[in-house]
Image (cartoon, rainbow, N blue to C red):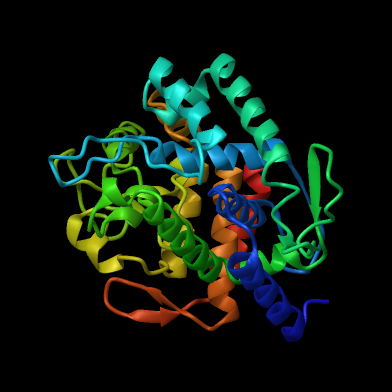
Amino acid sequence: MITPESQVTFLTNLQRLLSEGRFVGTHKYALILSLADISIERGDDVGSELEISTKMIAEKFIYLYWRQTSPYMPKANEVAPAVLRQNVGKQAVTVGRICDVKKRFGDSLACVKSEREIWMPLVSQVASNVRDMPLWKLQTVGSEEFDFLYPNVGKGTTITLRPGVATCFRKFYGLIGDIVRGAWVRYVRRYNRELLGATIDLREFMFGSERSQLGGVRDALLDAGAAKCFYCEKGLSDTTAHVDHFVPWAKYPVDLGHNFVLAHASCNSSKSDHIAAAEFLDKWVDRNLNMRGGLQEAFTTRAIFNDLPTSARVAQWVYSTTADVGGLTWTASSMVPLEHRWRAAINLLLATAG
């Protein structure tokens, strides 16, 4: 059973890892964020254990580091662009492997993932790196083994999150993400002072949405037949259509095709980072089911990540979290309580999406 006391203990223990653990690189931050993301996508809210493969973790590592392996462009002209250092000593192994792939095959993560003969070896290599470091070294404080997240067996290609851990990751996902990303940014700033100077936009560079791909998302949605504003239902064109994350990026910072909708600039701005009301959730579920084939084809053609079951589970999590705290949801005219019918819509999507 997940008690308030066990939740406080989880957060206290996580804080100890971050403040007292030894960080010679940023892999431990990436591991914590990866476990949190996987808990959202595959965990539950009743305290179950969760088995996670190092392959799953490796894929999350690649997503996290891909953006950060682009050369940072300093504002000071006297400093040349460079890839951010992520280790005390030589560059992190994962960063090096990703840089090699980008040099050979280009900057598009989606395109690389679509090429199995490129993607699978990269995942395998990063999974091996994860097993070497940091998987079995994360849960150490001083000389003390502190394995409250998963048994620290020291070998193998899977871990099992202890009972309640995935649930706590889900419950405190936003807080954990802010804390860990903040610590990661501070670490990178410490070891890249000459390159960064006094810049203040490092967090956006490291963790911001890949805005460069949103033009392709817009075209894919228009081609699939989504030619009206999702919220006000008035007509759109390729010049007036803005791409919106239905489940806000601020809530879950992963770009997935089925989570995108098209909207007018004013509707997009009004919704901002709010959770859309149940009436819009109904529309989102209907669109993803009724246009499933066309959307998947359009996304795949443009190498846009799409995984409807994962999008459904993420939506389930964010709406469940909103319901649990009695949170308000967005409509065009006001913020309103979340209607109970949200569960039926999500359950339909989960059952149909697989």
Q: At 35% from the left edge and 48% from the top edge, which residue is drawn?
A: 192
Residue sitting nearer the eye, 62 or 319? 62
- Is residue 165 placed above or below 77 in the rendered structure? below
Residue 75: where, in percent of width, then height? Answer: 16, 47
Q: Nearer the viewer, residue 325 or 79?
A: 79
Residue 118 x %, y %: 54, 17
The quadrant of the rendering that contains the N terminus is bottom right
Q: Quadrant of residue 12?
A: bottom right
Q: State the quadrant of the C terminus.
A: top right
* Residue at figure coordinates x 35%, y 56% from the top left: 203
x, y percentage for residue 72?
29, 40
- Judge from the rendering whether residue 42 lies leftward or rightward of residue 291; answer left or right: right
Tell me if I can see residue 246 in this picture. Answer: no
Residue 316 at least partly seen: yes
The total number of labels drawn is 0
Tell me the quarter of the picture where residue 29 sits. bottom right
Residue 266, above or below 288: below
Q: Is residue 105 above or below residue 317?
A: above
Residue 340 locus on image (x, y percent):
57, 75
Question: Would residue 198 be found to the left or right of residue 41 on screen?
Answer: left
Q: Which residue shows up at 21% across the image and 44% down it?
A: 74
Left or right placement of residue 148 versus residue 66 in this view: right
Q: Nearer the viewer, residue 234 or 89?
A: 89
